[in-house]
Structure formats: structure tokens, C-alpha cells
Image (tube, rainbow, N blue to C red):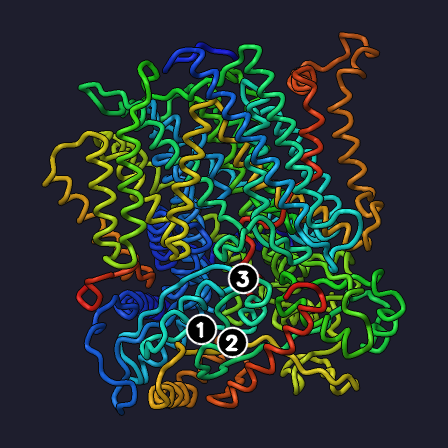
């Protein structure tokens, strides 16, 4: 269960592993506090009310956080997930992740105003760009083909209308 | 036989084609013709505050289809915006102040949800257009239950409300929950004493009744008619004003309990539209209701006509809101 | 009244060239729509319902059967290829299936899913024909207390999928349980952890959680560590299942059927618990347990068969009692009713031709599905040969499309990204994803069953005990105490399989002594089932 930390030095990862324990503990405390704020129910019967289960779950999180911290202290390290496309040597490529998130958020922000045909294409093009594709025109063509194609497929085939945005009335 | 099958195939293919073209996209959208004119209303959007395939969705799409077929409107776009028992959709409609191109499909569930979700947007901000259909609630007991009449049930319920669990297929605040609560109020049982068991849908509720888990249940008549015919459950009463066709059960009023309550669906428009615009919607919906196509829809879907329009619907809506709010606040839910 | 004679009569009704054509069209459309993101089998059937309007009853039902099976298989296809499960029942398929696809064995994963679905569907339909009336009577007797006992058992079983580090597995489970708590508590009607956000009132859709943790989380994680090599395609590998694949698949298919059918037949059973149980069972019995989590074919074959068997099992209460047990079954019920047919105890007597016609068409739909999709498996698999940048861009595109199309709310897109970030964090620190998903799905279900049982008994804790639940708890106790009991039993008498099975539990015990917390969390947790009909929530029956 303890494998050598790939990216970064061991101490560095060790410190961020404590962060996970801290996150779990904070989550547990949040759950417990919120559970205590739930007013007593006039509907539920018996000893198990709406707050009981959240209290148990919150407790579980806090206890687990403690054991995890202990495990890290003893030198245990989480094993980053491996995969076919994943290369664990070298540090995380935050620029790519950030670009992907930007493309994703752009889609969410633009979908209502500009329409899915545009926001979806932005998402695809942006994600492809972030992942290293540099065929700008080809990517754009594929992106728009996908977004228009899915728009018409949903609208004509299913009667589910994705937001047309500024092309309302034209599509 | 064979030719007949082939003919049916063609009809099927035709139907498929109709659906494909009929659903349309957003064509005809931009060209706005005023709401009050005689011609079809164009560019209308109908908000369904629930997912595709749900009850509101079925109703909303049927309304849109009939209005198109009857040329009362052209190019209606039905869109779904789900969430929080319909109050996410309600908020959206309320934000569209003065927009005479948007309608919302809604019903009793949204009335309850605006309280249980402490929604900022409320139905009294909207412009009520019409109530279309309703379904009576049934008070049912298992087939082998000792309760033969609503009086038997109420007597036992009064004696031991906690030990007489009542099942329903909606969360607290939904129609199956409000029905026993209103019944409790009317018959002198303290609503906070009522032991309500919430089931996840009509199927699980029916299993709960058949398995004898609950003493009785309140649910839509349609959910239990078949089981009642088979003798697996017994309908003690229905909550509508008049007896339900094909259901051998008295109304609560027949049994001397002054309670009329039903699950209903209707249509509201955005706030702040002009009287003319409202009247245009009322006229269009009235014409839709009077069409043969709508009557056919009612029959096909097994819906009970409950057409109430304009100001009458407005006052119905506010009465209904008050009634629901009162019960909900007593239970600490509003 | 011999069921076999009746069934042959049913085939007579269903097997005309026209009806075969309907079955074919149904499967084709069902698969095509089911493949679309965000569209699960229930919505597929609902959306395609209007297509059958012009047909006669038999033709329509046959087309349904095709759409039904096609929709389910379509969902599995995207789970395997893109790691985007469309409904909670195919979540488990995504785990091993997508790993297989990544290592160039997509065709085998798709094939074992197709054949497994066929085998399970066929056997389960046969069981449906033979035992439906008997099973239905027994199924109603299963009370919420019993279901809760079974949930406890499921949570105990879950300890074996906690991953290599149990403490991290438990952390993941806790995160999942917390997500499951969000929303309105169905028993009291009070909001929990919604922080006044309306969109959270109905809880977070399991599909959004699964797609967020699986597809978005994985895309972000991979992006951070993308292997940038010149040859950048997933190998297609052999297009067919090898002898070895068959040898490893046939037992899971049969076991999956055995697990899925009874769960489907029990009202409130659903398909999630049995698919998890099947996965756990296959992992324990497999000769290659080390491959689990890396693309073990048993992990696709078993859960897929289970899923289909439980779907067929779900028709038992649907036809004999008029009780739909899943969202898809509820839509089917509406469809059958639109022809003026009321499913219920008399259906088999009143409408024998129709019932047996439907059962026969289920067989046909199943067979057509196999014929259509087996040759297509290698074609689909080639889809993965596209460059990585397009593959992950496409996954993000379809994930967003699915999350948005299901509820038409931008909020879900932000939620998807947030959960994706959580998935990234979990991958970074070795928290396994599976326990989190299990927590989200089983947690709310378990809490609701327990609280239902307590409402029925008016708050008396004795309401959790009845004859059947006692039996289940006895089994739980036996599993937990087995290590103790074994000491008093002569070594030779112990059956080796049982010993193996309990070994893991024992291991769980020794590790940090935390198994207790697992069973405690089993007796816990929140609210809403994933597919809780929005209708009933919105009170819009």
C-alpha cells in the first residue's frame, strides 16, 4: 500500500497527503455541524431522525481522517492511479488541466446565451487544443460538426431541444 | 392477414415520420406576431419543469401538439428545466417578467414544492391561465384489511394514529402526503400524529399495501384501479367531488367527510404580461380544450377533464396554496 | 395450461416477417438512442414510445421489447468505450469494461456484454414464463426491514472492493455516502446539505456523479499526465473473443443471471445492488483477481448478465401485479396501459395471447440484439483509434451533453466539473473510485429502507426484525464470525471455497480493525434512490 511517490519528492507528497486527511476531517465536521442544525422532524418516528445517519457518516469521515493521518505518519502513501495513457514519471501538467477546465467552464457559461452549437464546439476545440492538437481548422470543423449534429439529432429524433442561443429561429 | 400487416407497417412508418418532422426544431421562432391577433400564436415556448417522459412532460407535449394541430399556435417549442420539485423552472418563468412568449406546465406538486423548497419565486407571481386535468386520490386498504368503510378506518386511526401507518408515493408535501393530512384535519386527528410512510413511486407503494406493511394508503386512483378490480386492495373512498367512473367507491363527501381534493395539472404564464396577452392565451387554451383532438387525448391518456380558466383558476390557485401552506407549516415544512 | 405450449403459441403470434421487422427496427433505434449520452434506457423507451402508436398491440409490444433491450445495450456500449455510464445499473460495467477498452480489448468487452446479455435475458425470460405467478406472490412479502438486512449484507460485501489500502477505500466510501446525503430526506421532507441551493433539493443525480468521477475525473487526470508518444493509438487487438475469453465468461454469465433475476423480481429490488454483488462475487471467485481494476473480462460478463436478468426479472411484478420496479419498467407499464391492457393478477388468464406474445417477443428482441451487435463490436472498438486529443475532447463533449440534456440545467455542468475535480483528487491520492460510487447509490437506498421499516413500526426498533431479516442477519453474523468459528472446526471439513471467500473478510478485520465502521455505515445513510420518479417528487402522478 505504500508505494514511492512518483511526482515530487517524498516529503512534499507526504505533506499533501496530510491535506487529504485534513479535507476528510473538515468534510466530516461540516457534515456533523450541518446535521445538528437540521430541525427535529414532526413526521419521522422513532430514534432515527433525519440527522442520525448524517451524524454517523460525519463520524466515519472524522475517524477515517484520523487513521489516514496515522497511516501517512507511518509512511503510507496513496498510490496514484496508473493507466494506459498515464505517465506517472514527471510532475503534473497543470497547464493542460487548467486549459481543459477553462474550455469546460466556457461551455457552461455560453450554452444558454450563445447556444449549444457554439458552446459545445468551443468545448471540443478547446479541449483538443489543451491536449496538444494543433490542427486548428480541422479541429474547428470537427467541433462544429459534432455540436450541430448532436443538436439536430436531439431535436429531430427526440424532441429534446438543446439551447439554440443566438441562432434561435434559424436552426 | 398479410396485407393487413403490411398496411399497419405503413401506418407505423408514417407515424414515425410524423414524429420526426412534427417535433420540429426552433424554426418559425423569430417572427413575432402579437399575442392578441386572430392568427396562430407563433414563437411560443412551453417550459416543462420536469424531465422528458414525466407526467408534466406528457401533458405539456400533448397541449403543444393539439395547439399546433388546431392551428392555434405554430412552432411551439417544448423545453425541460428540471429541479427542486419544479421550483427551478418556476424561478425561470418568474425571471421572464413580461415575456408573452412563454408558458409553463405545472400542477399541485409545484404548489407543495414552493413551500417545501422555500422557493423565492412563487406561483402567485405568475399569470395563471388554466387548470386542465385532474386525478382523484383514492383511500385504499389491503384486500384482507378489517376496515370495510372509511368510518371504520377513521375510528381506528383516531384511536391510534401512530399505529396506523399510512403509505403514499410522494415525499412529504406531495399529493399522497397532503391527502391523509387534510383528511386527518377534517376528521379530528392531529396531523403531527399521522404516521406517514413515503414510498419511492406507485409500484413500491402497491407492493407495500399488498404486503400489509401499511394500514392504508392514499394515492392516485389510476395506480390502484386494477388491483382493486382483482380484489387485492379495497378503495374505501375517492377524494374528488363526484364519483370516479369505473371505480366502485363513494366520495368522501358521500361518507359525510367535507373534503374535496385532487391532484391536478394546469398552465401558467410569465408575470407582468398585459391583459390582452393573457386573454389571447386564455382564448387559445379554451379553443384547444374544446377541440375534438383534446377530448381524444383525454380519453387516450385516461385523464379527467377539469377545465378552469382565467380568474377562476387564479382564485383556485390561491386557495390551494393557502390550504397546502397551512398543512405544511403545521408539520414544520413551510 | 402448460406454460410451454402457451409459449410456443406466443412464438406463433410473434414470428411473422412483419413482426420480425418491427423487432429489428426496435433494436436498431433502441441501440442508437441508448448510445446517446444522458439518455438511459428509461428515457429511450419514453422518447421512442410515440413511434409505436400506429401499430397494433402485438407489433407495438414486439417493437418495445426491441427498444428495451437495445436501449440497455446501447448504454453499456458507451460505458465500455467512453467510461460514461448512462444509468446506475451500468456503472459497474464501466469499471472493468473501460479498462479493457483502454488496453485494446474493447471488442471482447462489447462481445462478452452482448452474449452475456443474451444468455441472461434468455434464461431470465424463460424463468419469467415458468414461475412468474409464484414468484410474484412471494416477492410482495419482502418488507423494508428485509431489504435493509440485504443492504447490510451488501455493505459487508463491499469491504472486499475497498482496494489495496482499506483506509483509503473507507475514505472514498465516506465521500460517496456524504454526496448521497444531499437533498430532501424522503421520510421527513426536510432538506439536508442543500445550503439553500434549489438544484440540490432533489439530490445529485447518480449519473452526474458517475460521469463526473469516471469520465471527467479521468480526462483531467490523464491530461495532467498524458503520455506524449509518437504512436498514440489504442491497439484494436483481435476483433473476436478467444477461447479463453469464453472460458472465463460463461460462468459469470450464469451466475449473473442467478443473482439478477430474483433481485429484479422483488419490488424495490432494482438493478444496482445485484450488479455490485455480481462484481464482488466474480472478483472473489476469479482465478485472476489481480486483473480486477485493470480490465478483467469476468467483471464485464457478470454485471452485464445481471443487469439484463434483473430487467427481465422486473417484468414479473410488472405483468403479474402491475408493479413497476424500475424507471424503465414504469415507462413500459404506461406503454402497455395505453393499449387498454391493465397488467395485474388476471392478465395471464384474460390476455394469454398477448402475454405469451410479449414473452416470445422478448426472446426475439434478445436474439436480434445479439445478431445486430456482435458484428458491430469490432466496428465500435475502432472508434477508440482516434487520436488521444480527440478522444478525451470527445469524452468531455459527450459528458457535458449528457449532463445538460438530462435536466437542461447549467448548474449540472458546474457540478460535473466539481465532481470531476474530486475524481482527479481521488486518483492523485489513491482513493479508489468504486467505493465512492457504491456509497452514493446504496447509501440513500439503505437509509430509506431502514427509516421506512421504522415508520411502519411507529418508531419501534423491533420493526427491523422479522423472520426473513433474521435469516439474513444470521448470514451476516456467520460471515463476520467465521474466522472464530473455524477454529473449532477440523481443518479438513472446511470447504475450500467458503474459506477463500471468508479470507478477505478476515483480512478486513485485521486491518486497522475498521470493519466495524463499515458495517455501521451499512446501518446508515441517506435519502433518495437514484431513479426516484421525479413525478412523485413533484407530486405529479
In the image, residue B150 lies at what x, y percent? 80, 77
Do marks 2 and 3 share a chain?
Answer: no
Graded by Cα atoms within 10 Å as few (under 14), some (14 to 19) or many (20 or more), the crowding at tag 1 reads: many
Where is residue A29, by image quadrant?
A: top right
Q: Give the foreground label among 3 and 1.
A: 1
Tell me the chain of label 2: B
Camera-nearest label, 2 or 3 = 2
Q: Pointer 2: what residue?
A: B265
Instruction: List the residue tagged with mark 1.
Output: B105
Left or right: where A90 falls relative to B316: left
Which of the two residues, B324 or C519, is positioned nearer the viewer here?
B324
Q: Earlier in the sequence, mark 2 or mark 1?
A: 1
Viewer-side residue, B270 vs B220: B270
Residue C35, above or below B108: above
Task: Answer whether residue B163 is visible to the viewer in this image.
Answer: yes
Q: Are marks 2 and 1 on the same chain?
A: yes
Q: Which residue is mark 3?
A: C333
Tell me the distance, in whole angstroms, between the alpha carbons under discs 2 and 1: 7 Å
Which quadrant of the figure has residue C148? top right
Q: Quick check: marks 2 and 1 in contact, CB under 8 Å? A: yes
Query: Label 2: how many residues lie within 10 Å, few (<14), some (14-19) or many (20+)?
Result: many
Q: Residue at x 28, y 65 (%)?
A: B20
Quadrant hosting residue B7: bottom left
Residue B229 to residue A105: above or below: below
**C-alpha span from label 3 to label 1:** 23 Å
Residue C275 appears in the picture as rendered: no
- Location of residue B117 in the rendering, given as x and y in whole percent from the top left corner: 56, 62
Q: Foreground: C438 or C86? A: C438
SS of the residue at dot 3? helix
Which residue is situated farthest in the left direction here?
A137
Q: Quadrant of the N terminus of chain B?
A: bottom left
Amino acid at each position: 500500500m505504500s508505494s514511492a511517490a512518483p511526482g515530487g519528492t517524498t516529503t512534499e507528497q507526504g505533506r499533501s497527503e496530510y491535506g487529504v486527511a485534513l479535507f476528510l476531517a473538515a468534510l466530516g465536521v461540516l457534515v456533523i455541524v450541518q446535521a445538528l442544525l437540521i430541525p427535529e422532524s414532526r413526521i419521522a418516528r422513532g430514534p432515527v431522525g433525519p440527522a442520525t445517519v448524517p451524524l454517523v457518516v460525519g463520524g466515519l469521515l472524522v475517524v477515517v481522517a484520523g487513521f489516514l493521518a496515522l497511516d501517512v505518519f507511518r509512511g503510507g502513501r496513496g498510490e496514484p492511479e496508473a493507466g494506459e495513457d498515464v505517465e506517472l514519471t514527471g510532475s503534473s501538467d497543470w497547464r493542460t488541466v487548467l486549459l481543459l477546465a477553462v474550455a469546460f467552464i466556457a461551455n457552461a457559461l455560453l450554452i444558454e446565451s450563445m447556444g449549444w452549437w457554439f458552446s459545445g464546439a468551443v468545448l471540443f476545440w478547446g479541449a483538443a487544443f489543451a491536449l496538444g492538437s494543433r490542427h486548428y481548422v480541422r479541429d474547428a470543423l470537427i467541433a462544429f460538426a459534432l455540436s450541430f449534429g448532436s443538436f439536430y439529432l436531439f431535436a429531430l429524433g427526440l424532441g429534446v431541444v438543446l439551447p439554440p442561443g443566438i441562432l434561435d429561429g434559424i436552426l | 392477414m398479410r396485407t393487413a400487416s403490411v398496411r399497419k407497417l405503413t401506418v407505423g412508418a408514417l407515424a414515425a415520420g410524423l414524429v420526426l418532422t412534427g417535433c420540429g426544431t426552433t424554426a418559425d421562432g423569430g417572427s413575432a406576431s402579437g399575442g392578441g391577433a386572430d392568427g396562430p400564436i407563433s414563437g411560443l415556448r412551453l417550459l416543462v419543469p420536469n424531465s422528458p417522459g414525466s407526467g408534466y412532460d406528457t401533458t405539456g407535449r400533448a397541449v403543444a401538439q393539439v395547439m399546433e394541430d388546431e392551428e392555434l399556435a405554430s412552432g411551439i417549442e417544448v423545453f425541460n428545466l428540471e429541479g427542486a420539485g419544479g421550483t427551478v423552472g418556476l424561478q425561470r418563468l418568474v425571471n421572464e417578467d413580461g415575456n408573452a412568449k412563454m408558458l409553463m406546465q405545472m400542477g399541485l406538486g409545484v404548489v407543495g414544492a414552493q413551500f417545501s423548497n422555500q422557493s423565492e419565486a412563487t406561483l402567485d407571481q405568475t399569470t395563471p391561465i388554466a387548470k386542465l386535468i385532474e386525478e382523484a386520490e383514492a383511500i385504499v386498504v389491503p384486500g384482507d384489511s378489517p376496515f370495510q368503510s372509511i368510518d371504520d378506518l377513521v375510528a381506528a386511526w383516531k384511536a391510534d394514529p401512530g399505529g396506523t401507518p399510512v403509505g403514499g408515493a410522494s415525499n412529504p408535501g406531495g399529493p399522497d402526503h397532503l391527502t391523509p393530512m387534510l383528511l386527518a384535519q377534517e376528521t379530528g386527528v392531529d396531523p403531527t400524529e399521522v404516521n406517514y410512510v413515503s414510498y419511492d413511486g406507485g409500484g413500491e407503494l402497491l407492493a407495500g399495501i399488498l404486503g400489509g406493511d401499511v394500514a392504508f394508503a392514499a394515492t392516485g386512483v389510476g395506480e390502484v384501479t386494477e388491483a382493486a378490480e382483482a380484489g387485492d386492495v379495497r378503495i374505501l373512498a375517492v377524494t374528488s367531488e363526484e364519483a370516479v367512473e369505473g371505480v366502485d367507491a363513494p366520495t368522501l363527501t358521500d361518507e359525510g367527510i367535507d373534503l374535496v381534493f385532487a391532484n391536478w395539472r394546469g398552465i401558467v404564464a410569465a408575470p407582468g404580461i398585459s391583459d390582452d396577452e393573457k386573454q389571447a392565451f386564455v382564448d387559445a387554451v379554451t379553443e384547444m380544450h374544446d377541440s375534438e383532438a383534446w377530448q381524444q387525448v383525454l380519453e387516450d391518456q385516461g385523464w379527467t377533464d377539469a377545465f378552469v380558466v382565467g380568474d377562476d383558476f387564479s382564485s383556485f390557485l390561491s386557495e390551494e396554496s393557502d390550504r397546502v401552506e397551512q398543512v405544511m407549516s403545521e408539520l414544520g415544512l413551510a | 395450461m402448460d406454460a410451454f405450449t402457451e409459449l410456443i403459441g406466443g412464438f406463433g403470434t410473434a414470428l411473422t416477417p412483419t413482426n420480425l421487422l418491427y423487432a429489428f427496427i426496435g433494436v436498431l433505434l433502441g441501440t442508437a438512442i441508448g448510445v446517446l449520452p444522458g439518455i438511459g434506457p428509461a428515457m429511450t423507451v419514453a422518447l421512442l414510445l410515440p413511434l409505436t402508436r400506429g401499430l397494433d398491440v402485438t407489433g407495438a409490444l414486439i417493437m418495445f421489447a426491441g427498444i428495451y433491450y437495445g436501449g440497455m445495450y446501447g448504454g453499456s456500449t458507451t460505458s465500455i468505450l467512453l467510461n460514461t455510464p448512462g444509468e446506475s445499473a451500468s456503472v459497474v460495467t464501466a469499471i472493468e469494461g473501460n479498462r479493457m477498452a483502454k488496453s485494446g480489448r474493447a471488442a471482447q468487452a462489447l462481445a462478452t456484454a452482448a452474449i452475456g446479455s443474451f444468455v441472461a435475458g434468455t434464461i431470465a425470460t424463460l424463468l419469467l414464463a415458468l414461475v412468474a405467478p409464484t414468484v410474484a406472490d412471494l416477492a410482495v412479502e419482502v418488507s423494508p426491514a428485509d431489504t435493509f438486512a440485504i443492504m447490510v449484507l451488501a455493505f459487508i460485501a463491499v469491504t472486499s472492493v475497498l482496494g489495496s489500502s482499506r483506509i483509503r477505500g473507507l475514505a472514498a466510501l465516506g465521500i460517496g455516502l456524504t454526496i448521497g446525503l444531499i437533498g430532501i430526506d424522503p421520510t421527513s421532507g426536510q432538506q439536508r446539505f442543500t445550503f439553500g441551493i434549489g438544484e440540490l433539493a432533489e439530490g445529485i443525480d447518480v449519473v452526474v456523479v458517475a460521469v463526473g468521477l469516471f469520465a471527467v475525473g479521468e480526462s483531467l487526470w490523464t491530461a495532467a499526465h498524458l503520455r506524449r508518444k509518437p504512436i498514440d493509438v489504442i491497439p484494436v487487438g483481435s476483433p473476436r473473443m478467444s477461447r479463453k475469453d469464453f472460458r472465463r465468461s460463461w460462468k459469470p454469465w450464469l451466475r449473473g443471471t442467478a443473482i439478477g433475476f430474483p433481485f429484479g423480481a422483488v419490488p424495490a429490488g432494482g438493478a444496482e445492488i445485484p450488479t455490485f454483488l455480481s462484481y464482488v462475487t466474480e472478483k472473489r471467485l476469479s482465478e485472476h483477481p489481480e486483473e480486477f481494476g485493470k480490465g478483467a473480462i469476468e467483471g464485464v460478463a457478470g454485471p452485464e448478465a445481471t443487469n439484463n436478468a434483473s430487467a427481465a426479472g422486473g417484468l414479473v411484478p410488472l405483468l403479474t401485479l402491475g408493479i413497476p420496479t424500475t424507471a424503465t419498467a414504469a415507462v413500459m407499464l404506461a406503454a402497455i396501459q395505453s393499449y387498454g391492457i391493465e397488467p395485474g393478477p388476471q392478465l395471464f388468464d384474460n390476455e394469454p395471447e398477448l402475454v405469451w406474445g410479449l414473452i416470445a417477443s422478448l426472446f426475439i428482441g434478445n436474439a436480434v440484439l445479439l445478431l445486430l451487435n456482435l458484428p458491430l463490436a469490432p466496428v465500435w472498438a475502432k472508434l477508440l483509434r482516434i487520436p488521444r486529443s480527440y478522444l478525451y475532447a470527445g469524452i468531455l463533449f459527450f459528458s457535458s451533453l449528457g449532463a445538460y440534456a438530462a435536466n437542461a440545467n447549467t448548474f449540472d455542468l458546474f457540478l460535473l466539473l466539481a465532481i470531476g475535480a474530486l475524481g482527479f483528487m481521488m486518483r492523485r491520492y489513491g482513493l479508489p473510485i468504486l467505493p465512492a460510487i457504491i456509497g452514493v447509490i446504496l447509501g440513500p437506498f439503505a437509509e430509506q429502507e431502514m427509516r421506512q421499516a421504522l415508520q411502519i413500526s411507529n418508531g419501534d426498533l423491533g420493526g427491523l426484525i422479522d423472520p426473513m431479516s433474521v435469516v439474513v442477519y444470521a448470514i451476516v453474523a456467520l460471515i463476520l464470525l467465521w474466522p472464530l468459528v473455524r477454529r473449532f472446526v477440523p481443518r479438513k471439513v472446511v470447504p475450500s471455497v467458503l474459506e477463500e471467500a471468508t479470507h478477505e473478510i478476515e483480512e478486513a478485520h485485521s486491518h486497522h480493525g475498521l470493519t466495524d465502521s463499515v458495517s455501521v455505515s451499512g446501518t446508515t445513510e441517506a435519502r433518495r434512490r437514484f431513479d426516484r420518479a421525479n413525478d412523485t417528487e413533484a407530486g405529479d402522478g
